[in-house]
Amino acid sequence: MLYNSTFLGVLISLAGYELGMMLKKKFKKTIFNPLLISIIVVVAFLLICDIDYDTYNQGAKYISYLLTPATVCLAIPLYEELELLKKNVAAILIGIFSGALTSLTCILVMAFVFHFSHEQYVTLLPKSITTAIGMGVSEELGGMVTITVAVIIITGILGNMIAETVCKVFRINHPVAKGIAIGTSAHAIGTAKAIEMGRIEGAMSSLSIAISGLLTVVGASIFATFI
């Protein structure tokens, strides 16, 4: 029955995510990130039931169809804060540019320190941008797309989990600065946290996803030539 079910992947994924939501509401700990919990649940279920990934993905792939409209919906809070954007446009653009440049530079430094091959290096370059853009960048530069997707998801989950703590430690109190930092470093998954933190944070984080994605596409092409 499990192997023949068309929507097996959807059911497992949604069940895992719902469990994560329940744990987060009950314990109120960042470690109980719903996406992280759902990944653990799905992997454990597939291993225990001896179900291969292709069988799971036959149903789970339908969830990805919701990714595009969900991303577009992030423009709504940005539209609501359009006046704030106009007042701080220079600072916002400089902040996003700095974040994208820092991300690429960190990967370049890591590549030299750990002696990455060119393939490994370009695989990690798009780690801080949304999956849809990152996959294209990795494939174009000759990276390992599946590893890129995993790295992007891990980056987003970590960003979601530690965003609030990092802002407190470094005394980042301005909502615009918080949103830019989270969106530039942790893409859509981090933006979910930014929206929880406040309307302005969510709007600025949504903007950062788009602009940092475009900057990274250009920047990654340049940085790819360094190794």
Image (spheres, grey):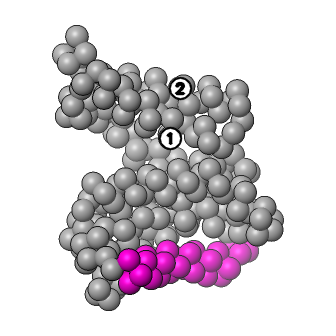
Looking at the rendering, which quadrant does residue 104 occupy? bottom left
Q: Is residue 114 left or right of residue 227?
A: right
Badge 1 local density, few (<14 within 10 Å), some, or many (20+)?
some
Magenta region: 86-114
Q: Amino acid at mark 2?
A: Glu
x and y, in percent, of residue 190 in the image: 57, 54
**Which quadrant would residue 164 be assigned to in this image?**
bottom right
State the quadrant of the C terminus.
bottom left
Q: Is residue 165 left or right of residue 65?
A: right
Check the image and report above or below for 177 versus 114: above
Report the Cα–Cα distance between label 2 and label 1: 11 Å
Q: Position of residue 80 (x, y in %)?
A: 67, 54
- For mark 2, what is the residue? 18
Quarter of the figure that contains the N terminus: top left
Number of on-image labels: 2
Q: What secondary structure prevails in the magenta region?
A: helix
Observer-side mark, 2 or 1, equals 1
Say whether residue 45 is left or right of residue 199.
left
Q: Which image quadrant for residue 181?
A: bottom right
Q: Measured along the vertical axis of the image, is residue 155 above or below residue 5? A: below
Looking at this view, is 140 or 33 the one in front? Answer: 33
Q: Which mark is residue 36?
A: 1
From this viewpoint, is residue 149 visible?
A: yes
Q: Is residue 90 magenta?
A: yes
Q: Amino acid at mark 1?
A: Leu
Question: Most extreme residue toward the top, as rendered?
Answer: 1
At x 49%, y 58%, the residue is 155
Q: Residues within 10 Å of mark 2 (few under 14, many from 20)?
A: some
